[in-house]
Image (tube, rainbow, N blue to C red):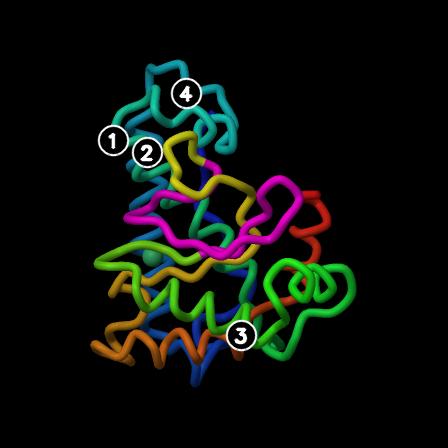
């Protein structure tokens, strides 16, 4: 069994002006495709070959650095494309909104914490909203690590993530990572994040 590149659920230009078409094209067709190809090469002939992506991540300390980086890269980008939408933005509703109020002190406090986690992650990595022991947490991780990994500092099920590698924003935003993070809030697909929240509970 080999992993396959996620089909982008909208056109490259669908998230403009918040994320530009050229960035989306390179990010999906070159970067994400590279993680998938390198993951398949790294697991070939190993016992990871017949495991699910989630199973590999949960035991990632047993595998090579190439598996860790590329399994994380594939999972993270698959999530990233799906939790964005041209019809995104606004606020979460329902059980997720209630949990943000209860666990994180409300939407504004969540937005501030998430934006800070994204802005202050040094170098390349991701900021996350994750479900950990039934509660919401905001955190960040380096490189292509994520909260599903057994090596993660913050463990849980990620339901929202932002890629803060420079390849995710540099063409349009250059060094202005906080502007990219702010724009990201206009494309968050809260219906999908809510679905993932309820599935994670
Ligand atoms: Mn990326």
Provide the residue designation for mark 3: 187
Residue at 22% x, 78% y: name it.
Answer: 174
Q: Nearest to the eye among marks 4 and 2: give it.
A: 2
Mark sitting earlier along the chain (2/3): 2
Provide the residue designation for mark 1: 65
Pinpoint residue 185: horizontal percent, then vertical percent: 51, 75
How far is disc 4 from disc 1 in space, using C-alphas? 13 Å
Viewer-proximal residue among 125 and 167: 125
Residue at 44% x, 54% y: name it.
Answer: 139
How far is disc 2 from disc 3 in space, using C-alphas? 28 Å
Provide the residue designation for mark 2: 68
Q: Residues within 10 Å of mark 1 (few under 14, many from 20)?
A: few
Viewer-proximal residue among 10 and 201: 201
Q: Quadrant of ligand 1?
A: bottom left
Q: Report the predominant secondary structure element of the magenta stretch.
A: strand
Q: Residues within 10 Å of mark 4 (few under 14, many from 20)?
A: many
Residue at 31% x, 54% y: name it.
Answer: 125
Name the element at disc 4.
Answer: helix
Pinpoint residue 70: horizontal percent, then vertical percent: 33, 39
The C terminus - image quarter: top right
Magenta highlight on residue 142: yes
Q: Nearest to the eye among marks 4 and 1: give it.
A: 1
Residue at 30% x, 65% y: name it.
Answer: 120
Label ID, residue 48:
4
Task: Mark 2 and mark 1 in contact? Answer it, CB < 8 Å.
Answer: yes
How far is disc 3 from disc 4 in space, using C-alphas? 34 Å
> What span is colored magenta in the figure?
128-148
């Amino acid at each position: 069994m080999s992993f396959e590149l996620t089909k982008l659920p909208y056109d490259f230009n669908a998230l403009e002006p918040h994320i530009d078409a050229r960035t989306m094209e390179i990010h999906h067709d070159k970067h994400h495709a590279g993680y998938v190809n390198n993951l398949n090469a790294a697991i070939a002939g190993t016992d990871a070959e017949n495991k699910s992506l989630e199973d590999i991540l949960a035991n990632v300390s047993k595998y090579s650095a190439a598996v860790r980086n590329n399994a994380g890269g594939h999972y993270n980008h698959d999530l990233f494309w799906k939790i964005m939408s041209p019809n995104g933005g606004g606020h979460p509703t329902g059980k997720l909104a209630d949990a943000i109020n209860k666990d994180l002190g409300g939407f504004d406090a969540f937005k501030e914490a998430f934006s800070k986690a994204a802005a202050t992650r040094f170098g390349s990595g991701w900021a996350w909203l994750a479900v950990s022991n039934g509660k919401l947490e905001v955190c960040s991780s380096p490189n292509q690590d994520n909260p599903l990994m057994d090596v993660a500092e913050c463990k849980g099920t990620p339901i929202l993530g932002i890629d803060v590698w420079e390849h995710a924003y540099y063409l349009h935003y250059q060094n202005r990572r906080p502007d990219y993070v702010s724009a990201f809030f206009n494309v968050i697909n809260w219906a999908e994040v809510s679905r993932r929240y309820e599935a994670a509970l």
